[in-house]
Amino acid sequence: MGVIRVLIVDDSVVVRRLVSDVIGECEDLEVAGIAANGRLALSRIPLANPDVVVLDVEMPELDGLETLVEIRKLYPRLPVIMFSSLTERGATTTLDALTRGASDYVTKPTSLGGMGSASEQVRSQLVPKIRALCRQEAVPAPSFRRAAVAESENTGTGRISIVAIGTSTGGPNALGEVLPALPGDFPVPIVVTQHMPPMFTRLLAERLNSKCALQVHEAESGMMLKPGTIWIAPGDFHLAFEANERGVMIKLNQAPPECACRPSVDVMFRSVVGAYGGNTLAVVLTGMGVDGLRGAGLIRESGGRVFAQDEETSVVWGMPGAVARGGLANRVLPLAHISRAITDAVLLSGKRDSATGVKRESHAHRS
C-alpha cells in the first residue's frame, strides 16, 4: 500500500484540525476528507475512498455507533477507529462499538496539557494504529529466542496450572469469543492482560462476567488465584503475582511501561513463570506490537506452552505474529479453535498427571 488515506469524522472543529495537522506531518498518511457527523461521512466515503475512518463516538445527526453500523453494512472490511472520550459513557460506548465491528479505538486528548500535549497524544496513539490496521507489521524474530526454543523442543508435556492470555488491538472481541466458550468447571485460574486504559478494563470485565460461565473480575492486589476464575489486569497497572504459603496472590504494580504498555503482557508472563514455572499455558491473541514476545520465550524456556492466534483471524497480527515468527508457538490457531485447544490442553495435562501418579505441584515455595 502507498499513502494511507484517512477520513476524519468529528463534530468538533478543533479535533478535526488537530487530527488533520498530525496526519499532515506524516509522509505515508494523508487526509482523504473530513465530515462533521455520521450522515455526511456516509455520503463522503464513496468519493473520498479512504483506507481508514477515524470516527467520533458522540455526534449530532448520526452518532458514531449508528454510523459504524451503516459502514459495516456497506464496507465490511474498511478499518474504523473510534475516537472516544475518557469517561464512563465514552468507555461504555466504545465497547459497544468494538462489539459492533469497530477495528480499534483511541481516547481523545484532554485539554489539560494544551495543544502540544494533545498533538503528541494523537501522534503516539492514533498514528501507529492507523498504520497497523492498514499494513501488516513485519516483526523480525530475534535469533536468540529461536535458539532457546530449539534446545527445549520437548517442552509442554507437564501439568498446566494456569492460563495466561495477552492481547491488544481486536482483543475485546477475541476475548468475547474465547472466554465464554470455556466450561464452568474449568480447573485452573486464568489471567488476562488487555491493553486498555482505566475504567475500560473494569467495564470489559463486567461485560465478560455477564457472558461467561466462569467468574470474571478486574484484578485487585491481595486477591488469591483460584481455579475457574478469570482476572483482568486493570488499566495503568501491571498484573503480577507472588507465591506464599496460601497459594498465589495478585500483586499489582505501576513499574515503568514495557513495550510502551502498562499493563504489559511481558510483565504478566514473566511473573507467571516466577510463580508457576513450566506449568503455564500462554495464549497470545490479536494485537499491535510485540508485547508478550519476550515473556513467551521465558515460558517456553521454563517448559511451558504457548498458543498464538493465526494471521487470518487477527485484526492485527503483530503480537501473535511475532511469537509465531520467533518459533515460540507450540500451536498457531484460528480464533474459533482457541477455546477448545485451551480446554483440551488443560484437561489432558491433568489426566496425564493422574495416570502417572504425579501430584499437583505446590506453588508456595516458588519465588
Image: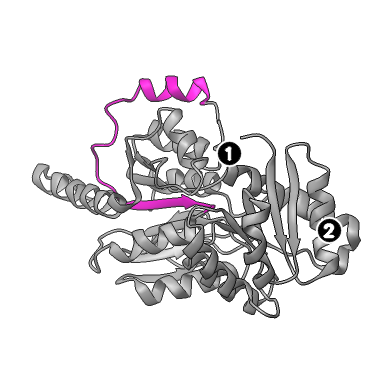
**For residue 145: magenta?**
yes
Relative horizontal placement of residue 204, taking residue 178 as reference (left or right): right
State the residue at coordinates (53%, 73%).
203
Few, some or many C-alpha atoms within 10 Å of disc 1 (few <14, some 14-19, many ≥20)? few
Relative horizontal placement of residue 225, taking residue 29 as reference (left or right): left
How far separated are the C-alphas under marks 2 and 1? 23 Å
Q: Which of marks 2 and 1 is nearer the N terminus?
A: 2
Three-letter amino acid code of the residue under disc 1 = Arg
Few, some or many C-alpha atoms within 10 Å of disc 2 (few <14, some 14-19, many ≥20)? some
| Percent position of residue 210, x then y | 39, 77
State the residue at coordinates (31%, 50%).
338
Q: Residue furthest left?
A: 355
- Residue 187 numbered tag: none
- Residue 135 numbered tag: 1
| Percent position of residue 165, x then y | 42, 52
Question: Does 156 appear above or below 365?
Answer: above
Question: Does 123 appear above or below 198?
Answer: above
Q: Residue furthest front?
A: 47
Q: Can residue 248 be seen in this view?
A: no
Q: Which of 310 and 245 is in front in this view?
A: 310
Q: Which of 176 and 264 is in front in this view?
A: 176
Q: Nearer the viewer, residue 251 or 229?
A: 229
State the residue at coordinates (62%, 56%).
46
- Residue 18 numbered tag: 2
State the residue at coordinates (23%, 47%).
345
Asked where in the image residue 302 lies, by quadrant, the reply is top left
Tell me where the magenta segment starts and ends, as one range.
Answer: 141-169
| Percent position of residue 64, x then y | 62, 71
Question: Does 21 appear above or below 306?
Answer: below
Quarter of the figure that contains the N terminus: top right
SS at mark 1 in the image: loop
